[in-house]
């Protein structure tokens, strides 16, 4: 289970309809609605600056939040829609969905690397590149992993770790069907430069040999 689910603070909105929503916006808040589960929809307001900051951080719609509203039990929610002003592109309304433990959702799960200290490629000076520090998975709301682990202990220079070689939590699967690369071990820049120079020298030698043959002819 994910150990750190961010809090999202809101207040219950008194009154419904367009009038109450407009008043919330005048007060520097964004109106929203919380729906789903076994309870009635709950109208809420969220401070405009708080929501805008979270939107700018990215992946707002694929982040699980612990919604805290005074007078109500905390509930896990995920954003299903953010309506924006067509001119200013600023948030004007949001829809949050309550989650049951069995609900399937898409979340970005952090990648943890192990085996770096014994990797033959890294011991030879190779460079580990974590192409995907997070992987988007379809997971069950009641069983969200803290992370997934990739093992690089046997990687040589030029090798890579793909999603098919990773043991995923029970019930989780990638949102991408193809077998994509998560990390790889590449040659150090000095070695790559030396290889390039060797290649250039070989081309020069070959050119000299061709020229010599032409002269002899």
Image: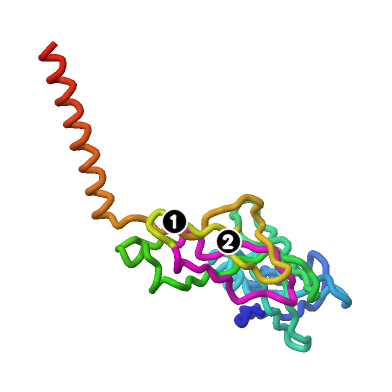
Pointer 1 residue: 159
Residues at discs 2 and 1 in contact (Cβ within 8 Å): no
Q: Nearer the viewer, residue 64 or 69?
A: 64
Pointer 2 residue: 165
Q: How many residues crowd mark 1 within 10 Å: few (<14), some (14–19), many (20+)?
A: some
Rendered location of residue 174, percent (x, y): 65, 59
Q: Nearer the viewer, residue 180 or 139?
A: 180
Exactly how many numbered labels are in the figure? 2
Rendered location of residue 186, percent (x, y): 37, 56
Quadrant of the drawing holding the N terminus: bottom right
Determine the residue positioned at 68% across, 79% down. 66
Q: Is residue 131 magenta?
A: yes
Q: Is residue 157 magenta?
A: no
Rendered location of residue 119, percent (x, y): 40, 67
- The image quarter containing residue 187 is bottom left
Segment colored magenta: 130-154
- Give the residue at the far top of this rendering: 217
- Element at badge 2? helix
Q: How many residues crowd mark 2 within 10 Å: few (<14), some (14–19), many (20+)?
A: few
- Element at badge 1? loop
Quadrant of the drawing holding the C terminus: top left
Q: Earlier in the sequence, mark 2 or mark 1?
A: 1
Rendered location of residue 37, percent (x, y): 85, 74
Q: Is residue 41 left or right of residue 28?
A: right
Determine the residue positioned at 79% across, 76% down. 101
- The image quarter containing residue 5 is bottom right
Residue 26 can be seen in this image: no
Determine the residue positioned at 65% across, 66% down. 107
Relative vertical location of residue 212 with respect to residue 73 in this rendering, above or below: above
Q: Is residue 113 left or right of residue 146?
A: left
Determine the residue positioned at 25% across, 43% down. 196
């Amino acid at each position: 289970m994910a150990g750190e689910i961010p809090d999202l603070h809101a207040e219950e909105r008194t009154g419904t309809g367009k009038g109450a929503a407009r008043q919330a916006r005048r007060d520097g808040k964004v109106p929203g609605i919380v729906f789903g589960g076994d309870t009635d929809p709950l109208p809420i307001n969220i401070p405009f600056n708080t929501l805008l900051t979270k939107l700018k951080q990215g992946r707002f719609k694929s982040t699980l939040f612990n919604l805290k509203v005074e007078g109500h039990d905390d509930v896990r929610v995920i954003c299903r829609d953010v309506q924006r002003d067509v001119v200013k592109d600023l948030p004007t309304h949001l829809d949050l969905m309550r989650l049951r433990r069995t609900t399937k959702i898409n979340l970005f799960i952090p990648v943890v690397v192990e085996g770096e200290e014994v990797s033959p490629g890294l011991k030879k000076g190779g460079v580990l590149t974590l192409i995907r520090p997070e992987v988007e998975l379809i997971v069950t709301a009641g069983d969200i992993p803290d992370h997934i682990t990739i093992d690089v202990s046997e990687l040589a220079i030029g090798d890579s770790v793909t999603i098919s070689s990773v043991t995923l939590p029970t019930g989780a699967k990638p949102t991408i069907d193809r077998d994509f690369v998560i990390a790889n071990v590449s040659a150090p820049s000095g070695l790559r430069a030396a290889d390039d120079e060797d290649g250039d020298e070989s081309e020069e030698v070959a050119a000299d040999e061709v020229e010599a043959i032409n002269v002899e002819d």
